[in-house]
Image: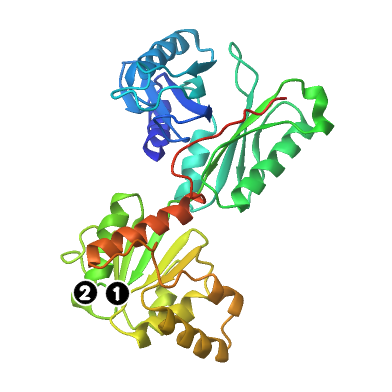
């Protein structure tokens, strides 16, 4: 999805036209993420996917119409076995897809800029049907909102909804009907898309487990920073998947790191004493996730010592320790699977395995 947004901005900078299709709402099992997007260029180039199969062919045809007419279309589909793609295992789901023309400058460059600055944002679109421009409003953390949905009361209500979604830290889209106080807005629905900064994973300890976690986490979209007090365990040759390697004493290295509320921290050092130093520093940071390898006994004893030195019990209780989902993992590779699965669960803010929204908001 991030690549799609950057491609939209690049297309606009070149003065070219295209169409952007976004999944708005779904019910039942569907063969795509609820953040699915597909960009179709005027030259027929495609980036992203809206599900594959015959459904995607229909969306391509719609995109061509939108590019020619420069008018958006909001369409509803009920998946048949043929539309669901190869295997037909997801047929029966319903979904709505918004396809909009892109080409002239809009709010997408500001979303890309916010992500580069590690600021959370949320794009709000007012859904009023096909055949007219879709009003948009962008909320960026720490800044005044940009754009308008058509009226100040609606804008203010939308900003509150977007800020609440950002505050929950969930990377899921929402469709909401306007509140009772805005009944004069008729059938307006708001489509809210949060854009959180890219997640950064700080792994303290470049040993066997840390290395496997690094490799797998990088594959699923985390920017990994490998930290160790030994140069031979924090370098590009040993951990090529990492984006950054930091060498320094565990009790001093935090001063070199930019840890924010979208950061993930894992203590996987070579010894309890080093893990304790990492955890003590980490609980003073705004990190969204802190995890530690080890046993329940190790955790209880360490928590007692940290609390005695002034560590916040509330913050300690938020730590994932022992780290990872309990799947009976044994080898470093298996442990990495359990850890990264837990990272994904926290990142997405949900434990649902499939997208199964069942009710569609009504104005």
User: Where residue 67 appears, x then y in whole percent?
Assistant: 44, 13
Residue nearest the observer in this picture, 97 or 31: 31
Looking at the picture, tell me which residue is in the foreground, 254 or 130. 130
- Above or below, 32 against 305 in this view is above
Q: Quadrant of the N terminus?
A: top left
Helix, strand or loop status at disc 2: helix
- Marks 1/2 in contact by CB < 8 Å: the verdict is yes
Residue 269 versus residue 93 in the image, above or below: below
Horizontal side, residue 221 vs residue 115: left or right: left
Q: Is residue 286 above or below residue 23?
A: below
Q: Residues within 10 Å of mark 1 (few under 14, many from 20)?
A: many
To which quarter of the image does residue 185 belong?
top right
Secondary structure beneath label 1: loop
For image coordinates 50% across by 90% down, the residue present is: 305
Looking at this view, is 36 or 243 the one in front?
36
x then y, percent, for residue 25: 55, 28
Q: Is residue 174 left or right of residue 101?
A: right
Among numbered discs 1 and 2, the one appearing first in the sequence: 1
Report the side of 88 relative to 191 (left or right).
left
Q: Is residue 307 above or below residue 181?
A: below
- The residue at which mark 2 appears reads as 233
Q: CA distance from mark 1 to mark 2?
A: 8 Å
Quadrant of the drawing holding the C terminus: top right
Residue at mark 1? 205
């Amino acid at each position: 999805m991030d690549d799609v947004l950057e491609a939209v901005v690049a297309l606009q900078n070149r003065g070219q036209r295209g169409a952007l299709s976004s999944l708005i709402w779904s019910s039942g099992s569907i063969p795509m993420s609820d953040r699915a997007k597909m960009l179709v260029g005027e030259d027929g180039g495609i980036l992203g996917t809206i599900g594959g199969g015959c459904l995607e062919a229909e969306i391509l045809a719609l995109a061509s119409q939108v590019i020619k007419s420069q008018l958006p279309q909001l369409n509803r589909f009920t998946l048949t076995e043929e539309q669901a793609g190869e295997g037909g295992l997801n047929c029966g789901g319903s979904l709505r897809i918004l396809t909009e023309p892109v080409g002239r400058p809009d709010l997408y460059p500001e979303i890309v800029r916010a992500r580069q600055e590690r600021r959370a944002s949320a794009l709000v679109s007012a859904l009023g049907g096909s055949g007219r421009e879709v009003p948009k409003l962008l909320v960026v953390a720490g800044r005044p909102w940009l754009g308008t949905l058509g009226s100040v009361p609606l804008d203010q209500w939308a900003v509150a909804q977007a800020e609440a979604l950002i505050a929950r830290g969930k990377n899921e889209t929402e469709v909401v009907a306007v509140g009772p106080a805005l009944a004069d807005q008729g059938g307006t629905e708001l489509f809210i898309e949060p854009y959180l900064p890219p997640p950064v994973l700080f792994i303290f300890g470049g040993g066997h487990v840390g290395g496997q976690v690094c490799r797998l986490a990088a594959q699923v979209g985390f920017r990994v920073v490998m930290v160790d007090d030994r140069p031979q365990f924090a370098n590009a040759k040993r951990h090529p998947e990492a984006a950054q390697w930091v060498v320094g004493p565990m009790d001093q290295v935090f001063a070199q790191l930019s840890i924010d509320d979208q950061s993930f921290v894992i203590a996987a050092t070579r010894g309890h004493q080093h893990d304790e130093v990492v955890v003590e520093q980490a609980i003073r940071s705004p990190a969204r996730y802190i995890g530690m390898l080890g046993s329940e006994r190790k955790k209880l004893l360490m928590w007692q010592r940290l609390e005695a030195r002034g560590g916040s019990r509330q913050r300690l209780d938020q730590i994932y320790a022992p780290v990872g989902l309990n799947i009976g993992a044994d080898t470093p590779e298996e442990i990495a699977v359990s850890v990264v699965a837990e990272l994904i669960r926290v990142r997405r803010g949900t434990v649902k395995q499939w997208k199964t929204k069942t009710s569609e908001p009504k104005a």
